Amino acid sequence: VDVENGVVLGIDETGRGEDFGPFVIAGVLARPNEMRELRDSKKVKDLEKKMQIVEKNALGIGVFSVSSEELFEFREKGMNLNAIEAKAINELYDFLKKSGKIKVVVDGSPLKGCKEGVSFLVKGDDLNPVIGAASVVAKSVRNASEDHGKRRGWGTW
């Protein structure tokens, strides 16, 4: 696959700064040209319509949703949000890698513990349409969640 014009695995998360509900990490496997209408979910109108674009054009979608209760359990095991996200990135990479060569781009600054070949792009959800698609998926899943539980141990992360 020609990664310049080929398939990209874009990854984004939502819920990092919240003190309630789930922490959601989403990955979308797609060709950037087919996701060009998408950007940071905080900047789009009609999230449901944007989600339909992702569902129609994505080659694959993977989601990790970590509930408020599970976050506390991870915290008890010594894992912080960065470690949880790095683990999810690696799992999404393994799950959605469809061909020998895909470009994997994650919104944000580099995280320790991610697989070799994973690149990071600050403000990537606005700059890369596939990361924008992952942002839309993550936000849609979080919005649909019935988990509104307060995160125990929050602030000690």
Image (tube, rainbow, N blue to C red):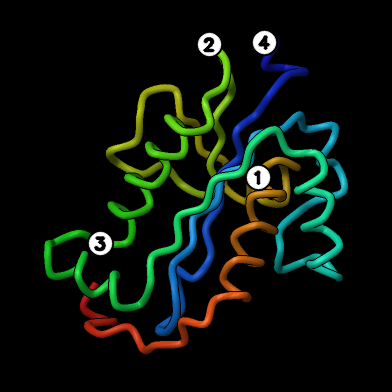
Which residue type does callout 3 highlight? Answer: Asn
Quote the CA–CA distance across marks 1 and 4. 19 Å
Res. 47 image quadrant:
bottom right
Which residue type does callout 4 highlight? Answer: Val
Quote the CA–CA distance across marks 2 and 4. 8 Å
Residue, disc 1: 131
Which residue type does callout 2 highlight? Answer: Gly
Residue, disc 3: 80
The quadrant in which the C terminus is found is bottom left
* Residue 142 left/right relative to 20: right
Q: Are marks 2 and 4 in contact (CB under 8 Å)?
A: yes
Identify the secondary structure beneath mark 4: loop
Q: Position of residue 140 (x, y in %)?
A: 66, 66
Identify the secondary structure beneath mark 3: loop
The residue nearer to you, when weighing 127 against 64, is 64
Q: Which mark is residue 1?
A: 4
10 Å crowding of disc 1: few (<14), some (14-19), many (20+) = many
Residue, disc 2: 100
